[in-house]
Amino acid sequence: MKRGVYIGAGISALAIGGLMFAFAQSHGHTGHGAGMHKHDEATMPGLIGENASAKESAELALMFRNFDTITREVENLPDGIRTVTRSSDQAVMDAIVNHSIGMIDRVGQNDDPKIAIQSPTLDMFFLHGDEIQSGVEMTDDGLVVIQTSENPDVVAALQTHAAEVTDMADRGMAAVHEMMMDQGRGH
């Protein structure tokens, strides 16, 4: 079965990537820097956003708890990225698609969910969402997203973020902890 969804403005790989990274980082963390609390795997309080719905937080939790079912391929393009994201678990795949579509809309409306902990690259996307062109297609292979921009800073952020998310999908919390430490956001 092949269904296509094309969206001319907004974001989708960021949607998957952005908040997957956010929910991955929030695995038990409730704030930034020295004020972070200990891990809380049951409630994942870091997934709660100042401007995120309970459904969005629940989808993030589902994806995080089942990150080992998620695979991603990323191709850096001269002006952006092409990603393919899939899950061996249908509920997780549905959450990925729902989350992606929701984030496309959020970026287009400059409606940052303000998840307690989210990748700093999302700031660039919410500042420059109107400069990102996204094409999204759901295929038998997974969610295919192509995102491009004429702004070289946005292109760099797209590529950096895609790599962060893929690392998290590949290595789980070890990758998340390393990213947080590299950003000076220890726990």
Image (tube, helix red, strand yellow):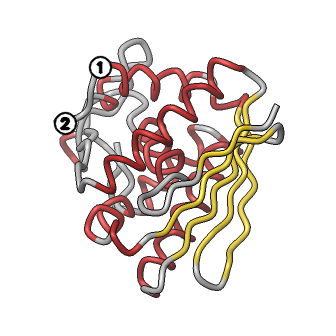
Instruction: Tell me which residue sits at (43%, 77%) in the image.
Output: 154
Instruction: Say few, some or many: other residues with alpha carbon within 10 Å of mark 2 (under 14 / 14 to 19 / 20 or more).
Output: few
Residue sitting nearer the eye, 120 or 75: 75
* Residue located beneath label 2 in the image: 51
Q: Amino acid at mark 2?
A: Asn
For this rendering, which residue is in front, 36 or 153?
153
Labelled disc at residue 54 = 1
Q: Quadrant of the C terminus?
A: top left
The label on residue 64 is: none
- 132 over 106 or under it: above or below: below
Disc 2, SS: loop
| Circle 1 residues within 10 Å: few <14, some 14–19, many ≥20 | few
Q: CA distance from mark 1 to mark 2?
A: 10 Å
Residue 96, horizontal then vertical, whole percent = 57, 34
Who's the residue at 27% across and 25% down the image?
53
The residue shown at (46%, 57%) is 11
The residue that appears at 26% across and 42% down in the rendered structure is: 113
For this view, does 132 lie left or right of residue 137?
Answer: left
Provide residue 144's location: percent of width, then percent of height: 70, 51
